[in-house]
Amino acid sequence: MDFTAGITEPTVRLGVTGLSRSGKTVFITALVHALLKQSRLPVFEAQAEGRVRRIYLEPQPNDDLPRFAYEQNLAKLMGDNRHWPDSTRQISQLRLTLEYVPESFVARNFGSGRLHIDIVDYPGEWLLDLPLLSQTYQQWSAATLAGSRSGPRTALAKIWHDHLAILSAEMPAEELSAMKAAELFSTYLRACRSQQTALSSLPPGRFLMPGDLEGSPLLAFAPLDVTPNQEFNSGSMGALMERRYNSYVAHVVKPFFYGHFARLNRQIVLVDVMSALNAGEAAVNDLRMALADVMGAFRMGANTLTTHLFGRRIDKVLFAATKADLLNQNDHDKLEAILRLLVQEASAKAEFSGAKVDALALSAIRATREATVTQKGQEFSCIAGIPEAGEVISGQTFDGEKEAAIFPGDLPLTPALALKGLQQSALHFVKFRPPLISGETFPHIRLDRAIEFLIGDSLP
C-alpha cells in the first residue's frame, strides 16, 4: 500500500524518537511550527531558494494512530503562562504537506510538486524492545541479571534482588509472586532512569512507558536467575514468566515493528548527552550501548524498487544532541564531537549498509541567549534566560519571572575525556522557561540543518 501510494503521492515517513527527557515533543512542535510559518531557515535549501510555495497540515493518514497534539503543545509554549509540554507517552502521528517548485527536469515534467511528511512520534524506550525479537526469555533474563549486578545498577537493584532470592524457576507458578517481581523490577528500571543515574539501556520499554497496557498481564513478568538455555517444567514459575514474555513480544513488540517501525524511511534520534555526562562514566557507557542497540534495530540501507515493494529501509538517520542552548555556543561543536564519538561504531555499520548518518548539536527551541559576565576582572561566557520556578542557583531560588545569567561550565577539549564523565568539572544545568517570542517563530539552534538533512533531498 505504501509503495502504490508513493508512486503518485511521494511521502517521507519520519520517525522521531529519543530516550526519556530528550525533548521529542518540543522538537516536533518546533519543527512543524517553523515549517508552517515558513521561518527563516537558511540551511533548508528549497526554502532559501524560494521554491517552497506553501506548507499545511492535512488529516491523519492512518486512522488507527492518535494525532500528535500539535496545537495543544504549541499553546503550552506560548503566552505568560508558557511551560514545556508533557513527555511522549504513546505513539502518535501528524501529516504535513509541502508544495514546491521542482528543480530537476524529471520532477518538473513528471512529478507532482508535492511532498507528504508523515511524522511518527514514539517513546525511545519502545525502540529498545526491538532486540527482544531475537532473544528468548532465558537469554533476556540472563543478560538482564548480569547487567544488574555491575556498576551503579547493583545498589539500585538490591530490593528486587532480595525478592528474586526467594523465587526459583522450578517453584509452582504463583500469580501474586509474579506480579510482585514485576513491580519491583519496574521500580528498579525507574531508579536506573533517574536524573542522578541517567542509565539508558532499560528494556522492556513498556515497563517504563506502559501507555494503555497499565495493569495488563502482559507486563506481569520479570527476569529469573536462569541460564540462557534452561528449560522449564509445565506449571512452574519459569514457564509462567516465559509465557508472559513471549506474549509481550508477540502482542506488543512485533505489532509495533511491522505496523509502524518497518514503514519508516527517515529517522531522527534525540539524545540527552549532557545528563549522561554529568551522571558519570557508567551512564555514558550505558548510553553508548543503548544507541548501539537502537542502530541494531533499524532496517537500514538505500531504498530501491525491491525494498519499496517488500519493506522500506531507513536510508537516513540523524542523531541530535538536544538542549544545546544550556551550553555556551563555544561548546556546541564539542557537544557534537562527543555525540559523534558515542555513535561512531553504530554509524559505521549504517554507512556500510548504504544509509546516510549525521550527528549534530541541536536546540529546537532556544530558551537562552549568550551573555558575558565579569567577576573580579575576569570575563565568563554565560547563558541568560528565565529559570523555571523553584530552580536554585548559588543559593537563590527563582520565581519563574526573573532573568538570570549563569556560567554552565565547559566541556573538555577532547571528546574522549568527556566519555569518562564530568564529576570533577560538572556542568551546571538549570531548567529555563520557554522564551517569550516577540515575532511568530521560536529561536533555535541548527533546526534548519536537521530539516535539510531529513527531507531536503526529497524536494528535487
Image (cartoon, rainbow, N blue to C red):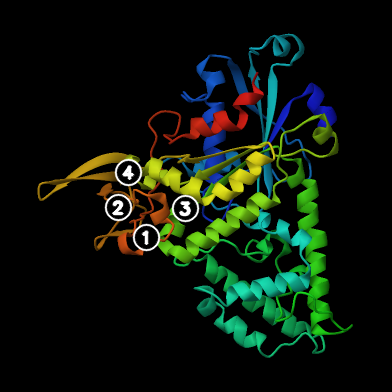
The secondary structure type at the circle numbered 2 is loop
- Between marks 3 and 1, how big is the CA–CA gap? 12 Å
Q: Nearer the viewer, mark 2 or mark 1?
A: 1
- Between marks 1 and 4, how big is the CA–CA gap? 17 Å
Query: Is residue 82 shown to the viewer in this render?
Result: no
User: Label 3 amino acid?
Assistant: Val
- First along the sequence among labels 3 and 1: 3
User: Label 2 amino acid?
Assistant: Gly
Residue 422 marker? 1
Residue 281 % position (x, y): 45, 64
Q: Badge 2 is on which residue? A: 409
User: Label 4 amino acid?
Assistant: Asn
Q: Badge 4 is on which residue? A: 328
Q: Badge 3 is on which residue? A: 273
- First along the sequence among labels 1 and 4: 4
Q: For the point 80% across and 81% down, which residue is it?
A: 238
User: Label 1 amino acid?
Assistant: Leu
The secondary structure type at the circle numbered 3 is helix
Most extreme residue toward the left, as rendered?
377
